[in-house]
Image (tube, rainbow, N blue to C red):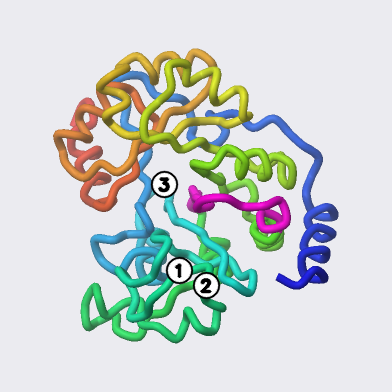
Amino acid sequence: MPAAVITLALVVVAIVSPEPSTVFASNVFGALRAPGDPAFVAAHRGDRAVAPENTIPALQSALDSSLDFVETDVQMTSDGVPVLFHDETIERTTTGEGRVSDHTLASLQRFDAGSWYSAEYAGTHVPTLEEFLIIFASSDKKALVELKDFWTEEEVAVVTELIYGYHVQDRVTLASFNFTTLRNIEAVAPAIPRVIIRRMLPAEPVRLAQFYGAIAILTSPASLRENPDAATDMHAAGLGLLLYTLNSEEKWSQAIGWGVDGIITDKPSTLDTWLADTAPGT
């Protein structure tokens, strides 16, 4: 990215970012759940049950539904534009080849990102983060946005400038596996809540979340099978616990029994209906 662009992004963020404020898990997720309480539903990469992942049709479908959250992934192109894409390379879901980071935006958007899913979506392109924020800003939903791999402070600033620019900072939570990226998010935009992603929980998940100033940890069901009290422990500290990616009634039921706050799923509408049908008193 040109130095002038990076400098401008940092200046804009410095101007529009509010002073650091304390954001609690309950501010983002609502009251923290007890075992048996329904969790919120997050559409994984948009509604993948109806459209190709991380495309505008999948994301719009999720935003048009009764779901609480949409989840998506962000990577940076070689010319410094944040785009929505999960894999490091583009072969699985586009007609192109190579790493996302090796393509300019113009190069990346020449490829078809929809025909692999069905002929109906032939010609769909890889969207930018800004394209998503345009439709997201007109909704009342919340978004969990994962920054893939490592991001510098300057790169994080490009993302947070867009978030503040579309006035959605109170509805976006940033997440990452990378601890340095989490620190860089805190340095650039401390008021935007952060979530740590771990495939397996550490021995002391509360301590980890508190050390990095995160409001929650997003983890796998395997972690809860090893430590079924983790949600209770996190809640006692005012922290949230989320699970990915659960796609069956058996796993949903187990997650609700643990008292997790949110479930990321590839079947968001099905899970939403299941939660309504199995709610106490129905």
Q: Secondary structure at mark 3?
A: loop
Judge by depth and name the residue closer to the eye, 276 or 200.
200
For the point 74% across and 47% down, which residue is it?
A: 188
Q: Which residue is mark 2?
A: 102
Judge by depth and name the residue closer to the eye, 29 or 147.
147
Q: Amino acid at mark 1?
A: Arg
Q: Find the magenta span and give its range.
A: 141-157
- Residue 48 vertical placement versus 93 (above, below): above
Judge by depth and name the residue closer to the eye, 128 or 204.
204
Q: Amino acid at mark 2?
A: Asp
**Dot placed on the residue nearer the N-terminal end, 3 or 1:** 3
Mark on residue 99? 1
**Dot placed on the residue nearer the N-terminal end, 2 or 3:** 3
- Residue 58 vertical placement versus 20 (above, below): below
Cα–Cα gap, marks 2 and 3: 34 Å
Label pair 2/1, CB-CB below 8 angstroms: yes
The quadrant of the image that shows the N terminus is bottom right
Which quadrant of the figure has residue 173?
A: top right
Q: Which residue is mark 3?
A: 68
Q: Badge 3: how crowded within 10 Å, few (<14), some, or many (20+)? A: many
- From the top left corner, tell me how far across and down residue 205 is, in percent: 47, 21
